Each structure stands twice: as C-alpha cells, then as structure tokens.
Image (cartoon, rainbow, N blue to C red):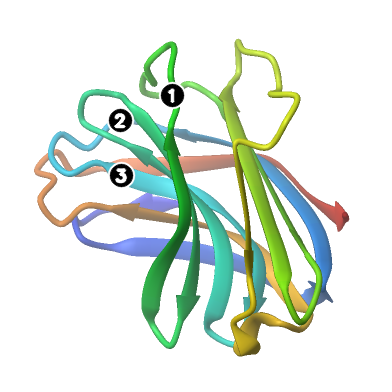
Amino acid sequence: MGIGTAGRSTSAFLGQTTSSSVDVAATLRINKIPNVGGGYFGVVGRRVGSDDYRLKVKVAPDSTLTLYTTKIVGGVETTLQVTTLTGPRYTADTKLHTRLQVTGTGTASVQAKAWLSDAIDPSSWQLSSTDSTGSLQTAGSVGVHAYVSSSATNPGWVVHVDDLTAGRA
C-alpha cells in the first residue's frame, strides 16, 4: 500500500467476509520511517459500515513502537488502550507480526499484540479491553490500514502486508 503524500491514509478490507468472533494476523513492514510525527499501520478486526475496531502500530521518528487498540465511530477515533514496546527499535523494512482478536456482541473483547520478526510471539496479549459501542456489536469485516503524519517531510512510503490471515477466534 503506497502513501505518496503526508497526512494521507490507505486501507483495504475483505468486505464480503464477516464475523463477530475473529482472530486476524498480518506481517507488516514499512520501507522508511516518517521523519516527523511518525507513521501508523495495522489490522482491522471488525468493520461495520465505516466504524471499526483496530490495532494501530505507531512507528515514531526515533523508531519506537507504540501499540494502540482503537475504535472509530462516526469518523471519530477513540483509544481503548495503549502501550509502548520495550526492547529493540524498529528499522525500515523490518517485519512486524501483528495479531488482533475481537470477540463478542453486546460487549466486545478487543485483544492485541505485536512483535518484531526476530523476537518470540508474546505469550499473552499486550493490550486487552472491552467496549460496548452499539454500532460495533454485530458481525463485521477485517482489513489493514496505514497512515503517515501530516508533518512528515520524507515522502514515498510503502507499507507491505504479508501473511494476512483471518479466522474464527
């Protein structure tokens, strides 16, 4: 997925496949780190209309990785939970494994984790929260997303998505 201009986003969804209990994973990498503001990429675990639950990974200009679980409702994004990963910093074109699980209706459970390709899959979820937003309490589709900060000045970003899988949680 290419992002040629700062402040832009791109996404892709599997709209014909829906579930209310999904475990989605993908290996992601970005060709260069945005020099100001950072870049975000990740997976969507439940998209209903234009609302969704997602895992966002921020790559900061200093190569720090921060994980967010968020919901987007009516075009407004709200952070459910956030954590900064410790250990090695991200470098351009390094594979990052991501996994997001969204289960339940009435109250959804949103769990996520991410790890660099040379690290071991964490044994537990790094983020775990619940949410009962009405528009998201039904089956939805899955996908991937990316965004580069509007303040970045080193254009030509490409986010690579490999090994995308989605199954029943």
Q: What amino acid type is highlighted by mark number 3?
A: Gly
Going 38% across and 51% down the picture, which residue do you hit?
2
Label 2, secondary structure: give it. loop
User: Identity of the amino acid at label 1?
Assistant: Asp
Task: Residue at 64% x, 78% y: name it.
Answer: 132
| Residue 114 sits above or below residue 147 on the image | above
Q: Which amino acid lies under the numbered mark 2 shown in the image of this protein?
A: Lys
Pointers 1 and 2 in contact (C-beta within 8 Å)? no
Q: Which mark is residue 139?
A: none
Instruction: Identify the residue at image location x=59%, y=82%.
Output: 133
Figure check: 112 above or below 52: above
- Residue occupying the point 36% across, 79% down: 76
Q: What residue does disc 3 label? A: 39
Q: Which mark is residue 32?
A: 2
Q: Nearer the viewer, mark 3 or mark 1?
A: 3
Which residue is labeled 1 in the image?
Answer: 93
* Relative side of 108 to 39, left or right: right
User: Which percent across, then down, holds residue 75?
Assistant: 38, 82
**Horizontal side, residue 150 vs residue 17: left or right:** left
The residue most toward the right is 168
Q: Residues within 10 Å of mark 2 (few under 14, many from 20)?
A: some
